[in-house]
Image (spheres, rainbow, N blue to C red):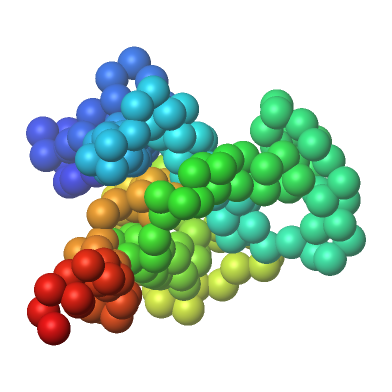
Amino acid sequence: MSFGRGSKGKMNLSQIFLVPHSSMLYGSLFSMIAAYLISYFSLRKKKMGNEALFLSLGSLASGIWLYELVYHYAYGSTLSQFLLDAQRIDISGTTGGVFPLAWAIIMILLPFAGYKWMSVNWFFIGATVAGFSFFVLWILVGFPQFDHVDWSSAWTNYKQVIPIPEQSRLVVAFVLNSLSKILVCAPALLFFPSKKVQLIRRRNQHTVAETIPVEVPPSTLSKKK
């Protein structure tokens, strides 16, 4: 895959966006590393022990399957196909056009085993909104794929709402595919410490401390008299 004018001006986009000797995007690699580290250090900051390791792995798996679910249904799906997907539990991924929806939901729910340490915060909201926004933009330009650049033009369910030049389809496919990977970090960010939540808890603690009546020993009252 190349981009540019003339043989001298060509630039191999795969060298920029893909990990060497693989078909994995740098965006995928960075998002997975970030998802694990965010959840792990957030949980360690909350004084968790070895449980942080397993919840972090669960957050990583949750983010990956959340992205796969959104990516799969971004192609469009009929109700009958959706119901067929819901009946399948399989770890082999998409096979025969059937997506393992039930398995994906189970994997997405894994980190909720640590729901006591979760809180909805602005970082989670920002990553979720950004991830879905990139998907919407990706669909509006025809949902081009870097491994099948002409796929969307032959896909009858999609029409380019935002037209882009044919020579730009490949770079747009790489860029939007990479940027949308921020959605992988969304479940991990539920463990991210939220200053707003901490402030509310501290205020509540002070309020409770002020309202609790203090019992005075009878001997102290008699001395005062």
Q: Position of residue 18 (x, y in %)?
A: 30, 31
In the displayed structure, 3 sits above or below 90; it is below
Residue 19 visible to an observer of this rendering: yes
Q: Residue at x 29, y 25 (%)?
A: 19
Q: Position of residue 214 (x, y in %)?
A: 27, 72
Q: Quadrant of residue 206?
A: bottom left
Q: Is residue 152 left or right of residue 206?
A: right
Q: Is residue 157 left or right of residue 198?
A: right
Q: Quadrant of residue 2?
A: top left
Q: Position of residue 217 (x, y in %)?
A: 26, 67
Q: Is residue 119 left or right of residue 88?
A: left
Q: Quadrant of residue 9?
A: top left
Q: Is residue 15 left or right of residue 187?
A: left
Q: Position of residue 67 (x, y in %)?
A: 51, 49
In the displayed structure, 144 sits above or below 142; it is above
Q: Residue at x 54, y 48 (%)?
A: 112
